Amino acid sequence: MATEKVFPMTQAGKDKLVQELEYLKSVKRKEVVERIKIARSFGDLSENSEYDSAKEEQAFVEGRITTLENMVRNAKIIAEAAMASDSVTLGSSVTFIELPDGDEETYSIVGSAEADPFEGKISNDSPIAKSLLGKKVGDQVSVQTPGGEMSVRITKIK
């Protein structure tokens, strides 16, 4: 029997997933069922694009519910104590300077379930995070990215 994947995340990340799951189950699922019922009333289902669209949305919503239930069930909460460290760990917020041009960037390293690069949250499975994990302030790190290699110097960890 295969073991289930563990999803490391912060408590806030788990709470966000639980909130999305509840919304999908209590609101979105009912909306989609209603759309299907209305589309059925239009008659011939073989040429009914509203029905096809509603069924596709239903499949997406049910798939997302299954995924979220699995993630919540297998969530491993990152302890706050583990985050308070002088080296980069899962849950750390890391500020670094790209070398040689000096562009400063800050990212929080989170589990893949709560990664959102637009909010500055990168997955612990990303090339940047993998290169930074275990490093300390002042360390110069070489990061292998899809766009090529880049060097960064860590300036702050919190």
Image (spheres, rainbow, N blue to C red):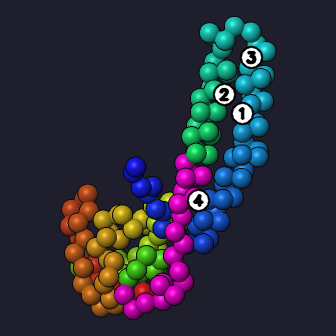
Amino acid marked by disc 2: Ala
Residue 12 counted in the magenta span: no
Amino acid marked by disc 3: Arg
Label 3 neighbourhood size at 10 Å, few (<14), some (14-19), many (20+)?
some
How far apart, in angstroms, are the residues tagged by discs 3 and 1? 12 Å
Q: Which residue is mark 1?
A: 32
Mark identifier at residue 72: 4
* Mark 2–mark 1 CB contact (< 8 Å): yes
How far apart, in angstroms, are the residues tagged by discs 2 and 1? 6 Å
Disc on the earlier residue, 2 or 4: 2
136 or 15: nearer the eye?
Answer: 15
* First to last magenta residue range: 67-87
Mark identifier at residue 40: 3
Q: Which residue is mark 2?
A: 54
* Mark 4–mark 3 CB contact (< 8 Å): no
How far apart, in angstroms, are the residues tagged by discs 4 and 1? 23 Å
Disc 4 versus disc 3: nearer the observer: 4
Q: Is residue 91 left or right of residue 97?
A: right
Helix, strand or loop under label 3: helix
The residue sitting at 58% across, 52% down in the picture is: 68
* Mark 4–mark 1 CB contact (< 8 Å): no
Give residue 28's position: percent from left, percent from top. 72, 42
The residue sitting at 39% across, 51% down in the picture is: 2
